[in-house]
Image (tube, rainbow, N blue to C red):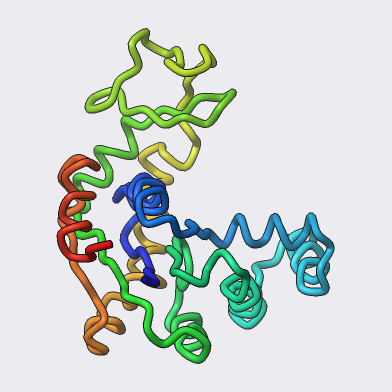
Amino acid sequence: MNFIFLGPPGAGKGSLAVKVAQEYKIPHISTGDIFRAAIKNKTPLGIQVKAIIDSGSLVSDDITSALVKERLAEDDCKNGFILDGFPRTIAQANALDTFCPDATAVNFAIPEESVIRRLSTRRVCKKCGENYNIVSVPPKKEGICDKCGGELFQRDDDKPEAISHRMEVYREQTEPLIAFYREKGRLFDIDAEKPTAEVLKSFKMKFKI
C-alpha cells in the first residue's frame, strides 16, 4: 500500500503517519529525512543537496524527485510506504507518477480556522521534540514535557503571522495536488478535524491491512 498524505500544516498528517506506519509496518518518509540521510551518507545527490542548501537556495523538483525515487527503491518500501511532504508541486507529482503510478493520495480535510487554532496552541519540547496542544492535549504540568521533563516552547512558525504565510504557500503550491489526484481517481478524503484515534479508525476501515 503506497500512500501520499496531503493537507495543510497542522492537519495531523505527521501524527497519523506515525500510527499507520506502525500498524501497517511500512516506512513513514519525509523529504527532510531523505535530504538529511543523503547528506550524511555523502551520496552524489546528497552532495548536490548540501551545496544547494548551504547556498541558501531551494532544492529543485528534479533533484528532490530523484532522491525520492532512490529512497522508494530501498527494501523497506517493498510492502508500501507513506510519503509526507512529497509531492509538494504538480511537477513533483508528475515525476512521482513515472516511477510510482499507483500511490493513493489521502487528503486531510480540515477548515482553515481549525488549522490556525491547532497551530497557535501547539507547544513542542526543546529536548525530545514531543508535541502538545495547550487546549486539546495539554501536558500534566504547564510548560513541562511529560516524557522527559524538558521545557515546552512555541515554534516561530506556529505564531499567527507565520501561520498565515504557511497557509498562503500551501494554497499556492500544494492545494492544487488535491484536484490533480481527484481527477485521476486516486484521492481519499478524510475528516482531519476529529481526534487522531478516530482518524486512524476511518483510515483502517478504508484501507484494510
User: Closest to the observer: 31 or 142?
Assistant: 31
- Please report the residue visible at 50 percent of the width from the left and 25 percent of the height from the top: 125
Q: Quadrant of residue 133?
A: top left
- Please report the residue visible at 29 percent of the width from the left and 50 percent of the height from the top: 11
Residue 89, visible in the rendered structure:
yes
Q: Is residue 125 left or right of residue 194?
A: right
Q: Quadrant of residue 8?
A: bottom left
Residue 164, visible in the rendered structure:
no
- Please report the residue visible at 28 percent of the width from the left and 62 percent of the height from the top: 209
Image: 159 above or below 37:
above
Q: Position of residue 167 (x, y in %)?
A: 35, 57
Q: Quadrant of residue 107?
A: bottom left
Location of the N terminus by quadrant is: bottom left
Image: 41 above or below 132:
below
Q: Is residue 73 left or right of residue 96?
A: right
Q: Position of residue 90 (x, y in %)?
A: 43, 83
- Please report the residue visible at 47 percent of the width from the left and 42 percent of the height from the top: 157
Circle count: 0
